[in-house]
Image: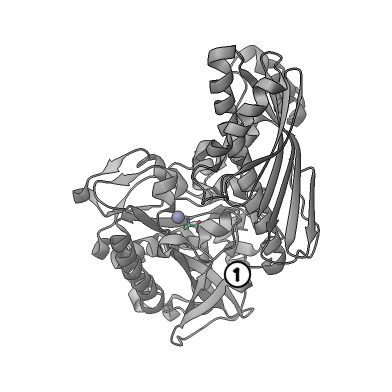
Amino acid sequence: MKLRLSCLYTLTKEVSEKLVYPILKDASEVLERGAPPGEGAKIVGKSLSKDKLTVVIESGTYVRPHDAAFRLKNFLSQKLGKEHHVGVKEIVGKLYEIIFDVPATPSEEVKLPYAKSISFKGKTCTLILEDVSEEFLQKNTVDRMISLIKEKVEFQQYGTREEHHKIIYEGSTKPMHFTEDPSQELINRKWVKRTPHRNQFIFGPQITELAEAVKRAYVDVIYKPLGFVEMMFPKIVDWSIWKKSGHARALYHGGFNPYLFITPKTADPKAWEEVCDKIKITGEIPSEDIMDLLEPPRGGLAFAQCPPFWTYLEGETVASESLPIKVFDWSGPTYRYESGGAHGFERVDELHRIETLWVGSPDQVQEINLELREKFRVLMEEVLELNIRQALVTPWFMEQKGVLDESVEGGAGTVDYEAILPYNGSWLEVQNCSNNGDSYPKAFNAKAQKGELASGCAGGSFERYLSAFLAQKGFDPENWPKKFRKYITVIPEDVKFL
Ligand code: SER
Ligand code: ZN
């Protein structure tokens, strides 16, 4: 890695070369601090015109020039301030040249905002920035740009999820009684009905009872024996939460976008009068006029379910006796603006699922992770009698942040549970289970009284459980496993529509 920053210091007064240049010479020690001998930042060029001092700083891996620029600012202020009453008014990075290696030779152009240019020679990238502000330099933005370029190059190589999908378990064969598309049958029977909105269904009484039965089985098989208790997680998520969890990065990452929420600019009835009058007169929605009365998005609707939980532990130190924390949430749907076509009941924009979440020491988290993994298997194979397999995949939170690396610190990892859909032979992800390492406690500054804090989470969709179940077992309750039937109170009669 090679970095070269041409930095313009605007001083509060005109100074002479005789005064400033010796100070730059003396600064070398400050610029080397913390780096192995000879490997810190170096001043390789300088010029002065009245109150404008330009300094060219070079460095390698140690002491980034943007750090060095601030060290130099402090040093200059110190030396010039006391005796000569000269301060540093502003720093601007006039030209920043960053040369570094990327994981592969890029197959196409890489674009990035704030970059003047990005070019490659094989696996060597040259990133050029021009006229960057003091704030930009200070916030370590440059390091984030470097990581993002590396990520984009890597993404060009792997693009799809398939690369990170390793089957680790294949379940035993269970009887199957159906070969049709269950979504179609659900619609035919009017157990569900599409709404005017894309990929959204209303659940009729019959499918609702089946969803309830899955919940009862979940509680009985998983939560009761493992001691999980219920919470209610918020579903409207402020930007600040996704900024911390990293999900703000995933506003678009291929599979879906989050739904965003917008709020009114004002509660003044006068401001809303005209819009309301228009609706009363025309019966139509004046969308453009409404947009004028709204703020830009302030966040979105929960799509990963667990990030808003972390407000609960944010900034807290959890007593040892309260660990591990084991909770679950099914207090409401989560939302995804799915890309691509509608996929019936198994891929919906409004998704009902159970989120399982546990927090403790890294050992506790891993132990619970393994217990849960076994219980999920029991629920699927022994209660629902599904044909399933398990796969090790890129941890969900890394994927949703747009990060593809499978290796994360703290033993983090995601296992997907997939069930086969006989009507088309594809595997459907029904449930996942992850050890998330220390990423959440770190992001939300949650600590344990003693030692490290880690967490895990698991998401299971009712639409997916039921799609898989009905796809394999069909709609005749006679063919449903007894162990599951005991959780069904009674299937309500079909409503007859004429
Ligand atoms: N939060 C995890 C996910 O979004 C589990 O629900 O997949
Ligand atoms: Zn989660």
Return the residue at label 1. Answer: 185
| Residue 221, image quadrant | bottom left
- For the N terminus, which image quadrant? bottom right
Percent position (x, y) of residue 97?
Answer: 74, 45
Percent position (x, y) of residue 257?
Answer: 64, 50
- Which quarter of the rendered image does ligand 2 occupy? bottom left
What residue is rendered at 61% in x and 25% in y?
Answer: 264
The one of 121 and 331 positioned closer to us in this rendering: 121
Name the side, left or right, on which 403 lies relative to 322. right
What residue is rendered at 54% in x and 41% in y?
Answer: 243
Percent position (x, y) of residue 467?
Answer: 53, 68
What residue is rendered at 55% in x and 78% in y?
Answer: 420
Name the side, left or right, on which 434 lies relative to 197. left
Amino acid beneath label 1: Glu
Percent position (x, y) of residue 24?
Answer: 63, 31
Mark yes or no: residue 258 visible. no
Q: Is residue 455 above or below residue 487?
A: above
- For the C terminus, which image quadrant? bottom right
Mark yes or no: residue 132 visible. yes
The colour mode here is one colour
